Amino acid sequence: MTAGAVPPAPLDTPSTPLNTLSVGTGGPRVAFLHGLFGQGRNWTQIAKALAGPDGTGARSTLVDLPDHGRSPWSTEFSFTAYADAVAATLRAVDPEARWMVVGHSLGGKTAMLLALQHPELVARLVVVDIAPKSYGSLDRFSGYIAEMERLPLGSLATRADAEARFDEPNPGVKAFLLQNLRRDGDAWRWQANLDLFSADAAKGTGSRIADWPSTAGELAPYEGPVLWVAGSESAYVADEDLPAMQALFPKVRSLTVKGASHWVHTDAPDVVVEALRRFVRPLADQS
């Protein structure tokens, strides 16, 4: 185990609830699922905008996925287990609700599996900059993981010390990764399950996180409305991904956000908020 890594209680899917943050006081139920090394609170500003000034535009639940934030850790990575854990958590929040589920990247794959495995829970689905396919490996994240492992947790004095020692030239990426660093008394630890992610990245093309589970093709297509959001400057979604998406989600429609990278909701929050408002409106009309 990485020095300083003190895991939370183990994940006992599906009975162990995930950590959540609530935003809004009324309106349709919306769940937000973050990407790798993210946390539910990364969606706070989007959720607040969706709730509106009086808080009644939507009731959002911002979920820390397993192995992230304050949620339990897994011993093995599984998209199926992630989706089941989210399903159990949403049922615990509101047993009667059907949700609009919004997922980005890793959270997008989890959201797709959630809709396929638990269609009765999902009224509408929003998938942000990810496709139902294998991405080969976690090469895109290997450098980040290695730098996180190099950080000498046992000798850190302050968070400023950690920031100075963390070798990442992009300030946004550095802040995003270092949000996972937590201080408990005099000790520092990673909140994310870094050992699990590192082991998965070391598998190369055998990575489960980069993959898409073959069992998804054995499930019935999800028949609800789906909005598929992509960044025009991102390489995660390509034109040739559309047939696979349509096979699983026949009612999918696409939105490409001009000038946005993989982190579409960070690059173009106003565009994403407006798209979500329009997409959730039919649920608001029914309530």
Image (tube, rainbow, N blue to C red):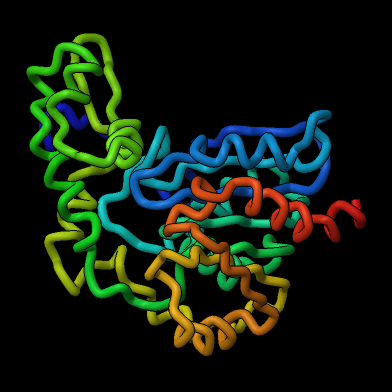
Numbered disc total: 0
Q: Locate residue 84 relative to residue 140 in the image: left or right.
A: right
Quarter residue 170 falls in: top left
Pinpoint residue 50: horizontal percent, then vertical percent. 72, 42
Q: Residue at 65% x, 64% y: name it.
A: 125
Q: Locate residue 82 relative to residue 28 in the image: left or right.
A: left
Q: Quick one: 97 or 103, which is closer to the camera?
A: 103
Q: Residue at 37% x, 41% y: name it.
A: 68
Observer able to see residue 10: no
Quarter residue 60 falls in: top right
Pinpoint residue 270: horizontal percent, then vertical percent. 65, 47
Pinpoint residue 234: horizontal percent, then vertical percent. 41, 65
Q: Residue at 44% x, 40% y: name it.
A: 39
Observer able to see residue 174: yes
Q: Quick one: 141 or 79, which is closer to the camera?
A: 141
The quadrant of the rendering that contains the N terminus is: top left
Q: Is residue 169 above or below residue 165?
A: below
Pinpoint residue 207: horizontal percent, then vertical percent. 23, 67
Q: Is residue 227 above or below residue 3?
A: below
Q: Quick one: 142 or 65, which is closer to the camera?
A: 142
Quarter residue 248 falls in: bottom right
Q: Locate residue 196 relative to residue 171 in the image: left or right.
A: left
Q: Residue at 58% x, 35% y: name it.
A: 44
